[in-house]
Structures are given as C-alpha cells and as structure tokens.
Amino acid sequence: MSDAAAATKQRGPSLSYGTLKKLSFAHSGVYVCLLIVWLVPGLAVATSIFGFVHGIGWILMVLLILLALRARVVPLRTATAVAVLGGIAPFFGSYEFIREGRKREAGEDASRELQSEAGVAASGTSPGGR
C-alpha cells in the first residue's frame, strides 16, 4: 500500500464540497417534508419525527460545516448560511452551495482560458491563426 493510500485510510473520510452540498440538499428535503406534515392535520407523530430529524440534521450540518470552514473547504458566507440560517430554513444553505458552485465553475473556466492563452503565447502563435 502506498504512503498516500495509507494516510487516506488513517484519516478516514474527508469533508468534500460535493458531500456537504448533497447533505445540505438532503436536509432541505427533510425540511420540506416537515413543512408538509405540519400543514396536514392529524399528522402530529410525523411532524414530531421530521422535526426531530430536522433538528439533529441541523446540528450535524453545523458541526460539519464548521469543520469544513476550518479546513477551508467552504467560504465563510456558505458556512454562515448553513450554520445560522439553516435552523430556520435550510434552503439558505442549499442556495449558497449552488451560488458557490457556480462561482467555482466560473473560476475554473477562467483558469482554463488563461492556461490555454499562456500555451498559445509560449508557442509563439497568435490565437487568430498565423
């Protein structure tokens, strides 16, 4: 086993941006279910169950997002949306993950363009042809 694989195995699972985004959307889904069962009369038990799951889910999301913030996986704005506003409505955190994802994609696209322009400049040809 290589050193990198051994180090990964010892550390355990990491908090990736994609994993946190999926968990945020799952938490938003639980919240939608909570709102539905709360609005329908006679579903007090389901309301209690989804309320409990939402509360525990929010606590876990806060812990995970703070760890991710410390590891610089997510920016402060996303962490604030999940940790502070997530207890009221987790949609804020999901929205921030979408916004941050778009920002990251735009940054990657710009980075690729700069690299391709640098490659063209290094080869001595102009982007327009000769």
Image: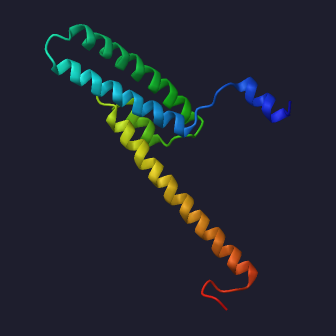
Q: Residue at horizontal 79%, vertical 32%? A: 5
Quarter of the image where the C terminus is located: bottom right
Q: Residue at horizontal 47%, vertical 54%? A: 103
Q: What percent of the width, then of the height, locates residue 11?
A: 71, 26
Colour convention? rainbow
Q: What percent of the width, then of the height, locates residue 31?
A: 31, 25
Q: How many dots with numbers?
A: 0
Q: Residue at horizontal 45%, vertical 48%? A: 100
User: Is 25 positioned to the left or the right of 66 in the image?
Assistant: left
Q: Is residue 56 above or below residue 90?
A: above
Q: Closest to the observer: 55 or 49? A: 49
Q: Single out the residue that lies furthest toward the bottom.
A: 130
User: Is 117 positioned to the left or the right of 34 in the image?
Assistant: right
Q: What percent of the width, then of the height, locates residue 120?
A: 68, 78
Q: Single out the residue that lies furthest toward the left.
A: 41
Quarter of the image where the N terminus is located: top right
Q: What percent of the width, then of the height, locates residue 14?
A: 63, 31
Q: Residue at horizontal 22%, vertical 19%? A: 37
Q: Is residue 73 above or below residue 114?
A: above
User: Is 121 positioned to the left or the right of 25 in the image?
Assistant: right
User: Is 98 positioned to the left or the right of 127 in the image?
Assistant: left
Q: Single out the residue that lies furthest toward the top.
A: 45
User: Residue 125, located in which quarter of the rendered image?
Assistant: bottom right
